[in-house]
Amino acid sequence: MSKYNKLSYIVMFSLLAIMACADSKDETEENLSQTDPQQNIILIIIDTLRADHLSCYGYHRNTSPAIDSLAAEGTLWANAQAQAPWTLPAHATIWTGLSVRSHRTLNPVPIMSESGEIQKLIYTLDKDLPSLPVLLSEAGFSTRGIANFTILSDVYGFDAGFDQYSCNEDGAGRAGISVDSLIIWLDEHSDERFFCMMHLYDVHSPYSPPEPYNTAFQEDPDTEYFDWEIHGDEILNKGSRDIAIDLYDGEISWVDDNLSRLFSWVRENSLEDETLIVVISDHGEEFLEHDWVLHGETLFQEVLWIPLIMSGPGIERGTIDSTYVGQFDLLPTLLSWAGVECTSYFDGIDILSGPGGDRVIPSSGTSNFVWTERDQMASTVYNHSKTIMMNEMQDFVSFDLVNDPVEQIPLPGDSAGIEDVLFYWATPQRGFPGFATSDEATIQTLRDLGYI
Ligand SMILES: [Zn+2]
């Protein structure tokens, strides 16, 4: 069976599988009896952290000694891909184990005023989808969630399943405060089986590390803040790229120092043999590698290459796994690790159970929160070949990520990669049977290729 046929079957059966999971109370009670009460999970999501700015991923600066130590005691996935280039859809993938096309956070939901007028359109996590906090809560975990950006608030559906959930909506919540809050909660719940999710926003722009981290990688103590000045499609302060990176790295150092306090708490409470610690990010950040900055506008590796590190019982120590994996693998992996069985469909797989074989790893997103079919973009990685569809879905470009990891040398036309992207793009969304795209040219291409 080709990889496409496999995907077709997976999509066809996904809805039935999701329903089976969500409605099975007996199964949940059975799960409770199967779980080991001594296994806890701490999930740390560092917003906007690109993998190659961590020392353990080969960065030339010592930005991350605490995370490096975690990696040395556990497993580092060297080729983890974000499924989306910005916060909301990427977190929805972590929550649901689904690709963006499946969990549908590209679809805008109208927020109505009392008089019935549309105030704004937002994208929300579908609360009917099985999610990591809900499934772990149902399996008996005490759950605590800490987030630091409005997009992860209860309005967007990310609080479901948490016994206690707090979200600093303006993004001003600092790693120090978040770690303090988490340790207070852990002190009160350390004798329970717990799942904690802590989302840290410090590394996100503007880059303004607190003293002394602002001078960790540049010498001027008066340089405390950097933000890009963008006018239309022009970046006005391109010449300050080095300062931007210096302060971005300072933020990583500040976050890492605070995480060292959390890791110390786990050791001091003798929970390291019972607690899985996971570090991941939602997406990376551009620093003009392809003439743009920040994230959300392109699908190059500076935005999609993310860290993924796990350390704890059952995790191989000091291991680097170079398999291509995705954010959507986290949920099925954590459920399996925790012994929680679920018959729901996930796009991801349990990556602790050995290599997943040939898989297409997809990513997609919209530009600027504005939803039209033409604003969207998609990419796929198959083995180490990557293809990106962009510019109103008319342009395709492919790269060999082994020989050209910074994506500077486009390969000659790669029809296999183009087919992968088009197939992903046409995958029906859950609850929306039929092909997701209405673009006639794309549909015709799929007809020509025999998919329709
Ligand atoms: Zn983000």
Image: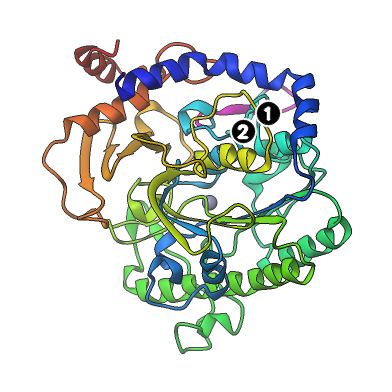
- Dot 1: within a 10 Å radius of its alpha carbon, few (fewer than 14), some, or many (20 or more) residues? some
Q: Which numbered mark, 2 or 1, is in the foreground of this view? A: 1
Q: Is residue 223 magenta?
A: no
**Magenta span includes 112:** yes
On screen, residue 230 above or below 96? below
Q: Amino acid at mark 1?
A: Lys
Q: Amino acid at mark 2?
A: Thr
- Bounds of the magenta segment: 106-116
Quadrant in which residue 243 is drawn = bottom left
Quarter of the figure that contains the N terminus: top left
Verify CB contact (< 8 Å) between mark 2 and mark 1.
Answer: yes
Measured as percent of width and height from the top left, residue 110 is found at 62, 27
Counting the numbered discs, the total is 2
Numbered circle sitting on residue 124: 2
Q: Secondary structure at mark 1?
A: loop
| Residue at figure coordinates x 35%, y 65% from the top left | 236
Rendered location of residue 44, percent (x, y): 62, 56
Looking at the picture, tell me which residue is in the foreground, 366 or 398: 398
Q: CA distance from mark 2 to mark 1?
A: 8 Å
Q: Would the CB of label 2 be found within 8 Å of ligand 1?
A: no
Magenta span: predominant SS is loop
Q: In screen coordinates, is 179 left or right of 284?
A: right
Task: Tell me if mark 2 has few (under 14), some (14-19) or many (20+) residues whose alpha carbon lies within 10 angstroms of its own.
Answer: many
Q: Residue at x 70, y 60 (%)?
A: 273
The residue under label 1 is 127
Above or below, 256 relative to 274: below
The picture places residue 345, in percent across and down from the top left corner, at 55, 24
Closer-to-camera residue (398/10)? 10
Label 2 SS: loop
